[in-house]
């Protein structure tokens, strides 16, 4: 059995063999373009072969640095946003204890990990200082450009705090910069201050970068086996290279998405039944939203956490507009399991479940919701994951990256750029009075007068 497997049998009312056959020429073309580097955005294909050509020396330095941070820090602050943040958090949440930061250090053995620079909230930053208190900490600043507003603000503040706490020399030994190899503000500062540096390659865009130093350093600090992550990523590279869609689940997933969109399903709901997967969904949303949401195209990627959300938006899924399909992340074996106990009074009427495991009940909820929703014309794609471990994390990331890239080529868009995210930044800079934005500033100030 494959450790990650797509099952589209519950969407068969919407996806026929004929539908699949019709898309095969488009798939062939997309596959050829991706693998020969002749498609759009082909400067950003570095993630495809990264599992076999990554820098082994740098990998060893990542492990060494992770050990140092584990030894000299109670807390690691990971500063970054978007592609320089979401994948790391997805990994640490997926692989770790549900309450990892609250577990006693002796048991956890690795630093607490907190994230900064992914919002512009002053309360968030000050609250984070309260959490750190007077404990020892280090910073991993992750930014290709070094000038992205959110992480740049956070880094300025935490760097200043670290320098005041330890002195400039010691602070420099506690700052790890993951950034461009040659250029940019952070690269310049890191050279000047002597920070340990890791490279964000030019040929790997932010949302495709988690399994590079961007994610690997903090994931290793959190105590996870990054060799196994690379192993899963490497095996996925092999498995999802196959041109035959019936032997390549990443390609079949891409095809299913396209067929469902053709049938009016404009929203995809990535559904999980494990709270540990909530941030994985956030990573997935960025991957598909930034890659496909252009030229007025693309399925809107959304996510739900079941069974929690069955009690809030379940009604809409069952009976609202028929514009969505579900992709369920089905974890076959839970990390831990426990049994429901027999209660003599049985006032809650749960005794019929006594001695069944909680995970068994979770899976019955999954089956029940899947049947109800497919009856309600919400097609269901299932991604079966053997268990949540490092190997499968590496595999799952590659599965979605490859599916996203091939799907993007089939849509005739560039899945590796994100021109649309600049517009709000231009406005924000103009409103903040950034030099160079003066003309725009006057125009915008006039417009917001009416607000
Ligand atoms: O996917 C992307 O390219 C973005 O999400 C970037 O990763 C994000 O904006 C952060 O950019 P930087 O690493 O330059 O700070």
Image (cartoon, helix red, strand yellow):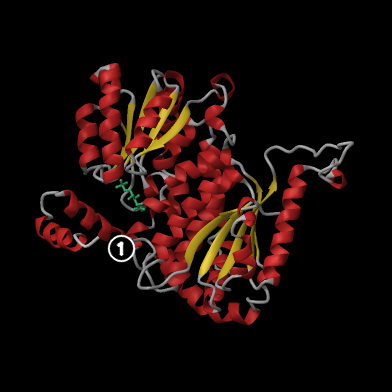
Residue 252 point in image, percent of width and height: 58, 67
Please tell me which residue is depicted at 51% across the width and 25% down the height of the picture: 110
Q: Which of 429/204 is in front?
A: 429
Residue 132 point in image, percent of width and height: 41, 24
Above or below, 57 relative to 414: above
Please tell me which residue is depicted at 45% across the width and 38% down the height of the picture: 216
Above or below, 411 relative to 351: below
Q: Quadrant of the N terminus?
A: bottom right
Dividing the picture into quadrants, the one containing residue 133 is: top left
Please tell me which residue is depicted at 46% across the width and 23% down the height of the picture: 70
Along the horizontal axis of the image, is 312 left or right of 411? right
Q: Which residue is mark 1?
A: 420
Residue 159 point in image, percent of width and height: 27, 28
- Which residue is the extreme one toward the front? 450
Dividing the picture into quadrants, the one containing residue 441 is: bottom left
Please tell me which residue is depicted at 46% across the width and 74% down the height of the picture: 29
Q: Which of 347/36 is in front?
A: 347
Above or below, 446 relative to 214: below
Along the horizontal axis of the image, is 95 left or right of 291? right
Asked if disc 1 is less than 8 Å from ligand 1, the answer is: no
């Amino acid at each position: 059995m494959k450790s990650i497997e797509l099952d589209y049998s519950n969407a068969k009312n919407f996806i026929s063999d004929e539908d699949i056959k019709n898309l095969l020429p488009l798939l062939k073309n997309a596959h050829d373009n991706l693998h020969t580097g002749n498609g759009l955005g082909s400067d950003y294909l570095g993630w495809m072969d990264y599992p076999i050509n990554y820098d082994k020396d740098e990998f060893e330095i990542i492990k060494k640095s992770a050990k140092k941070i584990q030894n000299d820090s109670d807390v690691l602050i990971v500063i970054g946003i978007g592609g320089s943040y979401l994948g790391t958090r997805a990994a640490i949440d997926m692989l770790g204890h549900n309450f990892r930061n609250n577990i006693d250090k002796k048991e956890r053995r690795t630093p607490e990990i907190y994230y900064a620079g992914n919002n512009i909230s002053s309360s968030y930053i000050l609250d984070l200082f309260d959490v750190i208190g007077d404990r020892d900490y280090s910073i991993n600043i992750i930014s290709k450009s070094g000038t992205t507003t959110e992480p740049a603000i956070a880094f300025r503040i935490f760097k200043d705090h670290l320098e005041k706490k330890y002195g400039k020399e010691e602070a420099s030994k506690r700052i790890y910069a993951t950034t461009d190899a040659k250029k940019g503000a952070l690269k310049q500062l890191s050279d000047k201050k002597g920070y340990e540096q890791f490279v964000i390659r030019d040929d790997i865009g932010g949302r495709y970068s988690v399994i590079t130093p961007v994610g690997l350093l903090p994931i290793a600090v959190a105590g996870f086996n990054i060799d196994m992550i690379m192993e899963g990523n490497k095996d996925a590279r092999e498995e999802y290279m196959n041109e035959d869609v019936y032997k390549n689940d990443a390609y079949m997933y891409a095809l299913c998405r396209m067929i469902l969109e053709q049938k009016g399903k404009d929203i995809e709901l990535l559904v999980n039944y494990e709270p540990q997967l909530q941030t994985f969904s956030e990573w997935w949303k960025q991957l598909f939203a930034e890659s496909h949401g252009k030229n007025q195209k693309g399925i809107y990627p959304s996510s739900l956490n079941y069974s929690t959300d069955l009690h809030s938006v379940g009604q809409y899924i069952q009976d609202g507009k028929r514009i969505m399909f579900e992709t369920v992340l089905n974890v076959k074996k839970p990390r831990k399991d426990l049994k429901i106990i027999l209660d003599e009074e049985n006032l809650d009427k749960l005794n019929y479940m006594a001695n069944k495991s909680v995970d068994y009940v979770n899976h019955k909820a999954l089956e029940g919701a899947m049947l109800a929703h497919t009856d309600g014309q919400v097609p269901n794609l299932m991604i079966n994951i053997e268990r949540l471990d490092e190997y499968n994390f590496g595999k799952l990331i590659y599965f979605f990256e490859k599916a996203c890239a091939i799907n993007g080529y089939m849509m005739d868009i560039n899945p590796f750029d994100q021109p649309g995210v600049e517009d709000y930044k231009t406005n924000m800079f103009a409103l903040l009075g950034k030099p160079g934005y003066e003309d725009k500033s006057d125009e915008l100030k006039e417009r917001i007068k009416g607000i």
